[in-house]
Image: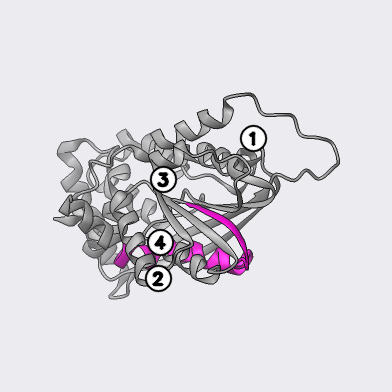
Amino acid sequence: MNSEARTRAFFYDLNVAPLWRDCFDQLFTDQVGLPDRGRILLIECGTGGLAVELAARLRETGSVTASDSDPERLALARDKATVANLENIRFLSIEQLAEERLADAFDLIIGDASLLPAASLATILKTLRAGINYDGKTVAYVASRGSFDEFFSIFWEALYTCDLAEELGPALEGLLFAQPTKGDIEEQAVAAGWRNILVTIARQDIAFETGTAFLESPLIAGHWLDRWMAIVPADRIADVKAAIVSIIDRDREEMPFELGLKAALVTGNRRADTTIAEEPEEEGEEALVEDDLADLLAAPDDDATEWTQ
């Protein structure tokens, strides 16, 4: 067992899920509602909070399949299911999921793309559509445009303080616009073959007591900070981080620093609005989508270790 990976999984369960994943799960519960029956698949299930809740609800009326790209998070989810004495839930690695025949297999599929690079959304949406049956529902979690705006304002000031704003301005603008807008999400869902698409966006404020607490939190240091700092020359990263902490602590005036998440819930299905038959998928398309998903999610995050030190 990799103790460092296990530690990251525990930090996710204790610190990331309550701040981040639970926001999306609650939005799903409010907008879609928990099903009473059926076959359900969760992709990027985290440490299994929603998966276990659904399996407990459907003990006699349905089944749950759950997958995650992190084997240790999946192991924690499996432990929760064992404690709950659930026999209608199974857990698959991403590689195992890619080997499954997903076509028409599930009544509900929930895919969490919220912590993945924005470029991965198209692959997630195609995979969700491939696995749903004709009357089923697809759901995706996405961090949309407008998330982290408070941080990016501080980031720009920190770069200015370090005499890097002019050099790195274009790169910072790229980060600012990396997350998709509601329109972008709708367009990608249409391109992936979704029908009857609805995108619901809710704002969630995530509080951090100090600037240091923000930078060192498992959510930020474990999932976002390396992406943001990638635009900064390696020999200046420490200076920029110090400037960020100083600016946050100066501006918060003894109040917590609040970071805004624009949580997007995307729902849809395969059912056409008209009686016109859908064009058949090309042979081999399903396998290609699933292989792409395995490549996408199985890539190791070698840089996300600093916050466990």
**Which residue is rendered at x = 35% and y = 66% of the image?**
82
How far, Cα to Cα, is label 2 from label 3? 31 Å
Characterize the local packing of mark 4: few (<14), some (14-19) or many (20 or more) Cα atoms within 10 angstroms: many
Q: CA distance from mark 2 to mark 4?
A: 14 Å
Tell me what residue is drawn at x 30 percent, y 49 percent: 71
- Callout 3, which amino acid? Leu
Judging by the rendered image, the residue that carries numbered circle 2 is 85
Q: Which residue is mark 1?
A: 191
Q: Quadrant of residue 308?
A: bottom left
Q: Residue at the top extreme? A: 283
Q: Nearer the viewer, mark 3 or mark 4?
A: 4
Report if the CB atoms under discs 2 and 3 are less than 8 Å apart: no
Q: Is the Cβ of the residue at disc 2 closer than 8 Å to that at disc 4?
A: no
Q: Nearer the viewer, residue 7 or 48?
A: 48
Image quarter hosting the C terminus = bottom left
Q: Looking at numbered disc 1 in the image, what kind of residue is underneath it?
A: Ala
**Which span of residues is magenta-colored?**
13-42
Amino acid type, residue under disc 2 in the picture: Asn
Seen at 32% across and 64% down, the residue is 79
Residue marked by disc 3: 116
Read off the residue under disc 4.
Answer: 48
Q: Earlier in the sequence, mark 2 or mark 4?
A: 4
Q: Earlier in the sequence, mark 1 or mark 3?
A: 3
Tell me the crowding category of disc 2: few under 14, some 14 to 19, or many 20 or more residues within 10 angstroms, Cα based.
few
**Helix, strand or loop at mark 3:** loop
Q: In terms of secondary structure, what is the magenta stretch mainly?
A: helix
